[in-house]
Amino acid sequence: MAEQQSPAASEPLVLAGGEIVERTGRRHADITVLDGRIAAVDPPGTGRDGSAHVIDATGCVVAAGLVDLFSRLGEPGNEEAETVATATAAAALGGFTAVLAQPDTDPPLDRLGQLAELRRNAAGRHCAVVAAATITADRVGKRLSPMAELADAGVRWFTDVGPLADSGLLRRALQYAGPLGGTVSVRPATAHLGGTAAMAEGAVSARMGLAGEPAASEELAANAAIGVARITGGRLHLDRISAARTVELVRVAKAEGIDVSASVAAEHLYFIDVDADGYDTLMRAEPPYRTAQDQAALVAGVNDRTIDAVVSGHSPVPPQAKDLPFDEAPPGVAALETCAALLLGHPDISVETALDALAWRPAELASATHLGGGAIEPGQPANLVVFDLERLWTLAERGSVSMARNTPHRNRQMGAMVTATIVAGRTVVTDGALCSMAGTVAALTAGTT
Amino acid sequence: MSTHLLTLGELGTQGIAELLSLTDRFVEVGRRPIPRVPALRGRTVATLFFEESTRTRLAFETAAKRLSADVLNFSAASSSLSKGESLRDTFETVQAMGIHAAVVRHRSAGVPAQIARWADDGVAVLNGGDGWHAHPTQGLQDSYTLWRNFSPMPNGQPGAEAADEPTLAGLRIGIVGDIVHSRVARSDIEAYTALGASIVLVAPPTLLPAQPRDWIDCWLPADAAKRVEISHSLDDVLDELDVVGLLRCQRERMVNGLIGSVPEYVARYGLTAERAQRLRPDAVITHPGPMNRGIEIAGAVFEDLAANRVLVTQQVSHGVAARMAVLFRLIGSGTALPNTDATPEAAPSEADSTGRGSA
């Protein structure tokens, strides 16, 4: 892939001719960016004067940068599959200006030293990296991590990246995180109800001869977590829900005023259990894909904003790991580059809803509106993305910068191509291609097809 | 049309019936003084057994040898799987040695289907049993055994009567035991229903899939699905059954909380002496083996019922002929399964004409 040179941040940059889409509405305007911030938002055609560097956004949607609440960045521990350099490049190509790095690394991010190491590694990359830390020390579900110390250092998101079997521990985590301004995120699943199975339980898993996880596994754990949130008042996030009944639980809990949010992985809006019928290990998901009815409920949940965020769920695995038997292959999809295109191209989801779920709402949840999903107004940090909704593309033709190859979308024709991404005023993607950045070029070469 | 054999369902009634007719020919070959034909001379059959097996491996090996194929054995114990090699690496290594068929057995469901995607053109993948999913050659040998038990070969010769079509129509077959964990049950259900039988699955709910009716209705063609019933009581259905198909109970599963106790299971689902008295006079017993005497079937019942009522030995013996039929059809004639144009007679008569059967 041809790399473009990123213009110096001190030169004015103009995003010209695009249609800005925000919560407050749509408008055509030129955006001038200077010194990392939005300097001006002018009527269309008036921003291009002088020698400013111009990105022509005519016919495109310009929006606040996307914020992913679930990405695994590979480091430390899974460098064979992905690195922070390649994952952040993939994120930028996918329109994200910030990603919430999941702490289920090896070792897990459960202390200040590892937080500092991640921040050092993430500095100067193609997008911002927001650190999440584990709820429990060593991520083994026994006792709390030093959440207050981590919160003092800026961490606002705590998750063991999976279920927390001990409801008493979840209660303490929510209590403890409350005054720290922290969100406690769990993926609801019940180990004793098949919570580790390769498939959703149902007619398809029975036919395939695979153990299944019933929807009740997720529902019971979600209900328990919501019950605990009710008595603690803390901020609970239900990570990557997959079942219709869970959506309904969240809807009811929100109506009751419980501080709960929820996310769904974009892939779950596309695939259902039947898609795994041929034992394609790319269809092994975490949580497993469920029925068409569940999927319809997830889409409805996104549309009525019961589900706050659509996440990439980016889970890189080394290529040979998907060449294992279905029930031994690690679940997950390398999704950063395709997530936004999938959602923006979804036939039943509007552009505004997609942007709310990909940018505006997750930025609020992650306390990261300065890194993405914020207002497009003078003085605000310049984290922006430009989509050409009409431009068709495939991952195979455009090329992938993620090291991970575990995507089922390699040859899927997608719309909504990201043509430009601006991170803190720097152009990191332009003309649909990654810009080179000092210090990252060598690392990226390894992952570029 | 498939070049592999992954499940029986994908063959359909006609494909299954053709293989059973072909099995007739190879049963006849097996009765000869020298039961060998040169149909697969120069062909190599690899058996890739990632899971321990005695009878299935022996049956495939014997079938391949009787067809004069070369056999290449691979077992997980002698492989480098433990050294971090992926499933795909292992298969591609074996494939690179020049094989025409791979018989794959694995404890994980779906592995034969995965390997079929990695196979070169001209390499047939045969499912030798994958997890709880399917064991198609077992389903063939079981349905062949039942067909020929209830519709014996006219004059003891294959093809003596034109109307001798494989069928199980009119039979009521009970499949009893650990159905949810059984690949044999799944393949038997596909074969028996395709051939017209009606089936009753007999098991406690813990040994059935969670929503058994949904499972059956989503899986089988509608006309087959409506001939499958589910019962939790062997006593309720015993006197309707023409066939009692017992499944092997794995002791480790039984004591793992899926049933209250082994005696409790025997009392409700075992073929006890008392139940044997209530069998219909022409009812027969099948079992894929190895049999746990005293659990699925009382020792005395096994000893007392005449050999023509317990078909276990016939199942094993037909297992060789059924696998010969599959190998012959997949890699012998160069045509895919199912194929109405193939001439099954070619195999035995070829042996007769060349005289190489005595090798």
Image (cartoon, coloured by chain):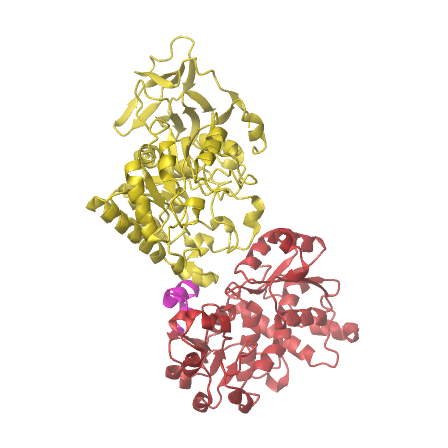
Chain colours: A yellow, B red
Question: Is residue A252 in view from this perspective?
Answer: yes
| Image coordinates for residue B158, horizontal then vertical, percent | 63, 80
Q: Nearer the viewer, residue A444 or A27?
A: A444
Residue in the image at 64% along x and 82% along y: B157
Q: Which residues are magenta?
A: B208-229
User: Residue B49: which quarter of the image?
Assistant: bottom right
Comparing A368 with B100, the one in front is: A368
Q: Nearer the viewer, residue B243 or B252?
A: B252
Check if residue A30 falls in the magenta segment.
no
Residue at x 51%, y 52% (from the top left corner): A280
- Give the x, y percent position of residue A296: 32, 49
User: Which percent across, then down, holds residue A227?
Assistant: 26, 51
Q: Residue at x 42, y 42 (%)?
A: A313
Q: Is residue B212 magenta?
A: yes
Instruction: Please tell me whether residue B351 is drawn above or below residue B110 in the rendered image.
Output: below
Q: Horizontally, is B120 left or right of B191 in the view?
A: right
| Figure quadrant of the N terminus of chain A | top right
Residue B179 appears anywhere in the view: no
A310 above or below B23?
above
Location of residue A103 (image quadrant): top left
Q: Residue A211: x percent and y percent?
A: 45, 61
